[in-house]
Image (cartoon, grey):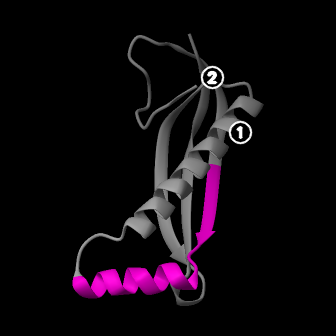
Amino acid sequence: MQITTTPSIDGKRITRYCGIVTGEAILGANLFKDLFAGIRDLVGGRSATYERELQRAREIALEELQQRAEEVGANTVVGVDLDYEVLGQKNGMLMVSASGTAVVVE
């Protein structure tokens, strides 16, 4: 299944719109990850731990988006938008949401 941020795919014709589909992932950061990320912030540099968690959340959200598109009979999702938020007490949760339009292309 193709998933794209563009509203169409060059050389393909959309034959049916199946509706809006979404995928979400909410992950919590544990105390040790927070501690090491805080140390990294003090000395500078990138936090590989948080980058991995962000990548994992994005992959989960996109997989869920694809599953929901398949459930409605689509073979492509166009116009995908990714949003990132921090939630919870002391911003301890990371949320990634993906939304797009499920379509059938030929």
Residue 31 in picture, x, y percent from top left: 56, 85
Q: Is residue 12 magenta?
A: no
Residue 105 in picture, x, y percent from top left: 56, 16
**Numbered label attached to residue 68:** 1
**Distance from the alpha carbon under mark 2 to that under mark 1:** 11 Å
Crowding near pointer 2: few (<14 within 10 Å), some, many (20+)?
Answer: some
Residue drawn at x 46%, y 60% is: 52
Q: Is residue 35 magenta?
A: yes
Residue 61 in picture, x, y percent from top left: 59, 51
**Which is nearer the eye, 64 or 9?**
64
Q: Residue furthest right?
A: 71
Find numbered disc 2 in the image and state the secondary structure of the residue it sits on: loop
Region of the chain picked out in magenta, as a range: 23-43
**Numbered label attached to residue 75:** 2
Q: Residue 17: which quarter of the image? A: top right
Vertical order, 86 against 68 (above or below)? below
Residue drawn at x 73%, y 25% is: 73
Q: Amino acid at mark 2?
A: Asn
Q: Amino acid at mark 1?
A: Arg
Q: Residue 18: which quarter of the image? A: top right
Quadrant of the drawing holding the C terminus = top right
Compared across the picture, whether 36 is left or right of 96 comes to left
Quadrant of the drawing holding the N terminus = top right
